[in-house]
Amino acid sequence: MSPEIIRLVWLATLDTLSMVAVAALIGTAIGLPLGVFLATSRKGELFAAPAVNGVLGLVVNATRSTPFIILVVAIIPFTRLIAGSSIGTAAAIVPLTVAATPFIARIVEGAIREVDQGLVEAARAMGASPLQIVRKVLIPEALPGVVLGLTLAVVSLIGYSAMVGAVGGGGLGDLGIRYGYQRFMPEVMATVVVVLIVLVQAVQSLGDILARRLNKRLRQS
């Protein structure tokens, strides 16, 4: 490959990393408290609000069940409102975040529901408030599972970021389509695929290592 193509691959990789990182951070900031609420707001739970829980659950399920490429097109007006445009790296962050938030919320909800309820009851018996139970019992105990779930979410975002290139989202997907497909440069497409595989493998390995360390520390405490 020519130096110019190598430069384009490098810049596209940086764009992909920035899109995924920002979407993952915003998605976690919104999805984490949403997941905690979904896990603790059914009837008889810490923050019992079954009606609100049901409505939020429907919204989360509806968003998760929408194919990503359709979601990207469906929220173009919202993307323009937030980012000022519907194409480019900054615009791609909007649908990526919208897709990641409910996914992360369900991950957090599932991890918290797996925490031994005996620990919650013991904390209640000692007079802990609901917020204290969430902060000092539920989240620490669920943390290894949450980390594994967030790893899966980031891996999914890498795939989504390549997909959003089909509608001018920038990054590796856009590079693969414009050069590898439209300009008949299979070496560029192959390079894009290899880079995406390396990114996914790196994220998965890092997440597995972090989850194991957190789980080990949790068992020792």
Image (tube, grey):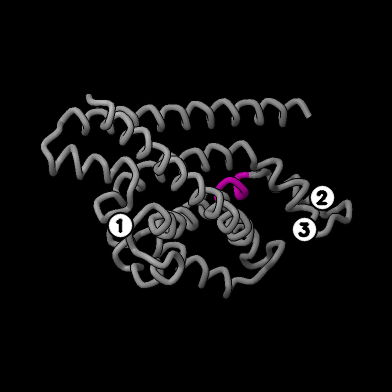
Q: Residue at x 70, y 48 (%)?
A: 138
Within-10-Å neighbours for mark 3: few <14, some 14–19, many 20+: few
Q: Residue at x 51, y 72 (%)?
A: 55
Point out residue 52 in the picture as x, y percentages from the top left corner: 58, 73
Q: Residue at x 75, y 46 (%)?
A: 137
Residues 34 and 168: in front is: 168
Tell which circle, 1 or 2, labels the residue nearer the N-terminal end. Answer: 1
Within-10-Å neighbours for mark 1: few <14, some 14–19, many 20+: few
Distance between mark 3 and mark 2 Cα atoms:
11 Å
Q: Which residue is mark 1?
A: 67
Distance between mark 3 and mark 1 Cα atoms:
35 Å
| Residue numbers of the magenta segment | 110-114
Residues 40 and 213: in front is: 213
Q: Amino acid at mark 3?
A: Leu
Point out residue 209 in the picture as x, y percentages from the top left corner: 57, 25
Q: Which residue is mark 2?
A: 123
